[in-house]
Amino acid sequence: MTVKTWMYSVLEAVQAEMRADPAMVWIFELTPPVASNAGMPVINLETEFGRKRVVNTGIDENWMASAVLGAGLAGSRAATYIPYQGAGMPFQLIQNHAGKLRHMTGGKASLPIVFVMEMTGQTPGFAGQHSDYEIDSTYMHIPGVRTVIPSTPYDAKGMMHAALRSPDPVVYLYPAGLRMLSEEVPDEPYEVPLDKAAVRQEGTDITLVGSGGGMPDVLEAAAQLGAEGMSVEVIDLRVLKQMDTETLVASVAKTKRLLAVDQTYYTLGPAAEVVARCAENVEGARFRRIAFPDAPPPASPEMFKWMRPDAARIVAAAKTMV
Amino acid sequence: MTVKTWMYSVLEAVQAEMRADPAMVWIFELTPPVASNAGMPVINLETEFGRKRVVNTGIDENWMASAVLGAGLAGSRAATYIPYQGAGMPFQLIQNHAGKLRHMTGGKASLPIVFVMEMTGQTPGFAGQHSDYEIDSTYMHIPGVRTVIPSTPYDAKGMMHAALRSPDPVVYLYPAGLRMLSEEVPDEPYEVPLDKAAVRQEGTDITLVGSGGGMPDVLEAAAQLGAEGMSVEVIDLRVLKQMDTETLVASVAKTKRLLAVDQTYYTLGPAAEVVARCAENVEGARFRRIAFPDAPPPASPEMFKWMRPDAARIVAAAKTMV
Amino acid sequence: MSATHEDGSGEGLTRRGFLRVAGLAGAVAGFSATAARADGQIGYFATDLSDDRLRDMLRTILRIRWHERTMADRMLSDPQYRAYNHFYAGQEAVATGVCAALRNDGPFDQIDLVYSTHRPSGHALAKGVDMKRMQAEMDFRSTGLNGGYAAEMHISDPAVGFMGADGMIGPGHVIATGSAFAFRARGSDQVAVVFGGDGTYATPHFHSALNNARMLQLPFIYVLENNLYHQYAHYSYSSPHTDIADAARAYGIPARVVDGQDVFAVYNAAKEAVDRARAGGGPSFIEAKTYRYYNHWGAPGAEVGKLGAFGYDPLAITSFRPEREVRAWMQRDPVDIARKTLIDWGVLDAPGADALEAEVKAEVAEAFAWAAEQPLCKPEDGLLHVFAEGAVLPRQIA
Amino acid sequence: MSATHEDGSGEGLTRRGFLRVAGLAGAVAGFSATAARADGQIGYFATDLSDDRLRDMLRTILRIRWHERTMADRMLSDPQYRAYNHFYAGQEAVATGVCAALRNDGPFDQIDLVYSTHRPSGHALAKGVDMKRMQAEMDFRSTGLNGGYAAEMHISDPAVGFMGADGMIGPGHVIATGSAFAFRARGSDQVAVVFGGDGTYATPHFHSALNNARMLQLPFIYVLENNLYHQYAHYSYSSPHTDIADAARAYGIPARVVDGQDVFAVYNAAKEAVDRARAGGGPSFIEAKTYRYYNHWGAPGAEVGKLGAFGYDPLAITSFRPEREVRAWMQRDPVDIARKTLIDWGVLDAPGADALEAEVKAEVAEAFAWAAEQPLCKPEDGLLHVFAEGAVLPRQIA
Ligand SMILES: Cc1ncc(C[n+]2csc(CCOP(=O)(O)OP(=O)(O)O)c2C)c(N)n1
Ligand SMILES: Cc1ncc(C[n+]2csc(CCOP(=O)(O)OP(=O)(O)O)c2C)c(N)n1
Ligand SMILES: [Mg+2]
Ligand SMILES: [Mg+2]
């Protein structure tokens, strides 16, 4: 057990899986699979496993994703790290090929593959084109891929192990803003399941639901509300597909108030699905969402920060409900 | 006023706009812009406007969409008809370029462009890869594009005029299953607004909401329920972005029961947004969705038809609510 | 011209004799404009094969042809028939010649993999897919190759290295390079082959597949079946190259143009490419000049001369296939060429060839009969196979 | 070699004299390995220009250079400074030479359009974008070129035909062909130019842009700035071509390799391509061999030698830029070459050149001062400009 950054925790999982399986491959573009952490050996997948298994490609994210799919179909476990600038490029491949092949082949396709998708849209200055937080919804809507979005280094490592061991294609969303988040993370391999939300805090007055890059603000808001005497239940979705309806419904059945928070655009963000599932299953509750507006993130920090749902906004919204 | 097919009605609008604007271009791939209709002249955009303005390309839907965007930026009105097989190809272009450019340029970009996107997934036999009804959610989530989905020849023509005249990029979803639907359609140009849902039938017991390729079944279900004495309000979304919240909320505030129907996958289909918006705004109502399950459409007609929400399913669902 | 390999049976001379005659016949028929431009004789690999393997190639061509003709008949005549099809008749020698050079049985981690297209039945049969189960799949039966989930444009059978029809134009080529990448990474001598039409040239994926295969020196073979048209357009509408192989050469990839009507010419080019790939020599590109006899596509209820049936394409606005072009290509039929070559080589005599054809016809008839008797799918099984385990929920059920 | 055009002022001989000397100097400095391989003298278009226009080219180079140096200084020293940048210093002659051959003012439907990259400031200044407003945009000010929505990687100004930085690698080239398509459709003689790095070669979009431009014979010019690296990799990791121009030639597109450090060589190639496009002769490709002095990218708070600053790239795992390579390229500095050429041609003398540089420095200082005083953005304006009219709703507000 060592305090580790998110990035180190994830690569530790990848390294362990690649050591265990000499056929496994990793494809990257501009983020070298290298991480260092105080008191720990440097991880460098490229030098450890060689360029036949760990390849740095030209600027062609659709090739990266397609190659991973082809490797999986040929029976090799395969993963790729798609930089956020290219996160939209492999959409068609994942939507129409990776996500449909098992069903379309009547269960015959071999798909032990992981698409790590970097997400931005959390940092002022990047602006429009260089913000892609919206892909959470994009990859959550389609069937046949398990879309997950860890929010802590512990989950990031455990879900990476689970993703790499899963026979299903996994879209592993990686909020870049959390890269340097640190916590105690076990050195040995372990799995965090790919189908369970996490109840981060129990409470009875209101249910706050968030995910990924939004969790630090949700937890901060819960702390502030708790300090003011509100009993807040906090759920971290962790898994977008298949969403853990039971955990959500059980919580809202208890609190009768749901505030769902998205960092992605309001319309059809994951929070829409959270509200819809709870509204279908819990009668007489109150429902509310806050999210990034239906506008691309602007460059100016003044505009951007005002638009992003932060702890203060969450606190204010919760107070109107309880 | 003549009875016209959907396809003819749409091309009539395109033809009128191209006659009015000699700079306007149309890019197609395998669906020639040709339509005939009893008692009406044949429309053939390619022969009428020539191959400099109406171009048939190689198999490269991303080029088609990109070329239309580039033409728009250069000041020309432009539209393309993307066949359903390629509907996922231009995702990145529309998500990260067309939808963001106005905002990113501080309002400077010229974007009088229309992406006609063919949708399938309504017909048994096509199967997995050749079904793409799911793109409704994909293009509804992103900002900066007006995503519309007409369900009648009248709306199809009027919304095509409105789309071609709009300064905003329009994703014009075209459910292929409705191609031969016919009704009386005016011969002269007219507009149907790009931001209004249509109340197809008024009622007080329950609100049924559908869109696009699902509307014939929704209307059929409403007729059956009406015959059995239920007072059903029917709303055709018509516009996915920006969704007409007011019409939806007003209806549900009255009926207190919402049944939203999707032909796309359950998770994050447009119905999720419909339910979420109404649940946030109407207290004490009952909410329910039916949709295609979170599985790719299989080839077998027996499996496919059982999975598709049809009139019988809608009737059954409505009866459990009233 | 390189030295010939003779198999010691004394047939070598006769075989070469035929090749000369066939060449002449082509010239006589006046094909200079439309006929394939081949790179000439590549090697004599085919002449080295055992009689059994040569006969198997003819058999495969016949199986594809008769499967297809039977299908077309059903579409025109049988109201119970449900399967649609993208026709391959006319192109049989390409699939057959290529797959004959591949490893088609054995454990999955040793066989060569083939990625197919929206026009898969020829590739599938040539790679070793079971005809009965394929036909049942096309007819949406639960005992079909893919349980009724796939239908024609999506059939697959990894057990014989047939990785699947891919109905999308473009992505398959890139995906196939990924399999080749996996082979190289795990030190396997397997080869990944992708079939594609002339229509694939214009896709952005063409560049991706070739450039990455070249940069990483992958064991990857791109077989481009240039049948002159992609749906309703001649390939000159989308490619500046007369020989699309020239585009591959620009990447430094060895490329061959072969006569796609001659299964042995195709085999020779494929064998050369496969040997190169197994030896670590990287990718190859083969452009087979060929032609499709029927329409792009056909479906039950078809009527001769109407859309989706056979012959002239009524939707063909920008260009269409002239009747004479179709007839001219039929003069160089892959069945005839293979049959005549084998008779000339003394591998078969005419009665033997007829017997083979009769056998094939019987097999095809049996496959259709079997398929038509297979059970339909259980509706709720549509919820299976979304993930490796379990079923998804039937959300629409009240 | 074609005949020279002399402008009658008697300078022709001197000009040619310089060119010979410059060629020699290059050889002496021993650049054979890393220096640009140019196609030799293309034409003498540049020698025909008026002295004013030649001086303007030097001025543009200097404006880009001093804008950038000032920016780098601020990043290292000014805690209030907020703008990040992708550095262009070293490549100035490319943007300048290309844009000098274009129509940059007049009504929007008559000027030529330039599509830029994630490294846009040089292209923007050369095309005529106002430096003050550009700098204010980079610093996220509400009076910036794009109201604070864009920042460096997304600046644009259609009024001068600067269609925008495009931070995504690939799509811009394809989009630019769409503008060219619109020009041809409406019978305009405008030209669409796209800049792209060596990194663009591997994108699927490269094929799309070139193939469609070629098939439709569009007035489109692809200017590939080969600065040897894309982010942390040498271009030989992603392209099999030594000259990427060879890839364009494979499509039948006329392609030139030019010395990207010599603004007049670039101008000559651009002029030839623009003339061809205006005359309906279709697309052209220009590969400019060039080099970037600073790091890929820099941001406020940078420290010399650290990531995001200047010099060696610590993240460069797969490859990095050797110190000697940087120094060698600096010997052929585009500012020096342009200045010496104009002095040699008698267009300027040394004091005149110094005065020009001083003027430019003053302009740059003023632009930075102006930008720093501009107002910040109003938060709620982030909801504007999603659609042409109105604002979207601030959904997150309680
Ligand atoms: C991405 C994509 N766009 C469009 C289509 C529709 N489509 C099906 S087959 C075909 C033509 C393919 O031509 P070619 O590659 O030459 O193969 P052929 O049909 O001649 O065998 C097209 C355009 C598709 N399947 N995929
Ligand atoms: C689609 C996409 N993938 C990745 C990136 C990240 N990225 C930014 S600049 C760059 C390198 C570009 O290299 P090159 O085209 O040679 O231009 P240069 O930086 O040398 O000017 C990369 C990979 C991107 N912007 N877009
Ligand atoms: Mg073809
Ligand atoms: Mg570069």
Image: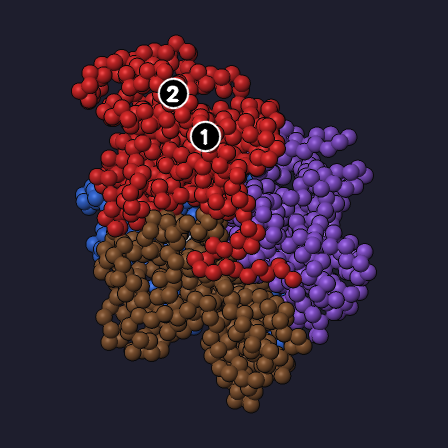
Chain colours: A purple, B brown, C blue, D red
Disc 2 under 8 Å from ligand 2? The reply is: no
Q: Callout 2 environment at 10 Å: few (<14), some (14 to 19), or many (20+)?
A: few
Can you tell which quarter of the image residue C259 is in? top left
Q: Is residue C327 above or below residue C190?
A: below
C-alpha separation, residue under disc 1 versus residue under disc 2: 14 Å
Quadrant occupied by the C terminus of chain B: bottom right
Q: Residue furthest top?
A: D28
Is A277 positioned to the left or the right of C234 in the image? Answer: right
Q: Position of residue B84 (x, y in %)?
A: 42, 59
Q: Residue at x 35, y 42 (%)?
A: D161
Question: Which residue lies at the image location 21% right of the left edge and 54% below the top edge?
Answer: C324
> Which of the chains bears the disc numbered 1?
D
Tell me which residue sits at (61%, 26%) in the image. D303
Dot 2: element: helix
Q: Is residue D77 above or below residue C127?
A: above
| Residue C351: image location, x then y, percent | 33, 52
Which numbered tag is attached to residue C366? Answer: none
- Along the viewing direction, whichever of D367 and A165 lies nearer the viewer: D367
* Label 2 sits on residue: D355
Determine if the C-beta at disc 1 is less than 8 A from ligand 2.
no
**The image quarter in which residue D131 lies:** top left
Task: Report x, y in % for residue D80.
Answer: 60, 35
Label 1 secondary element = helix
- D82, C352: nearer the viewer: D82
Chain of the residue under label 2: D
Q: Is residue D36 visible?
A: no
Asked whether the residues under marks 1 and 2 belong to the same chain, the reply is yes
Mark 1 and mark 2 in contact? Answer it, CB < 8 Å.
no
Mark 2 is on which residue type? Ala
In the rendered image, the vertical position of residue D354 relative to residue D240, given as above or below: above
Q: Which mark is residue D364?
A: 1
Q: Earlier in the sequence, mark 1 or mark 2?
A: 2
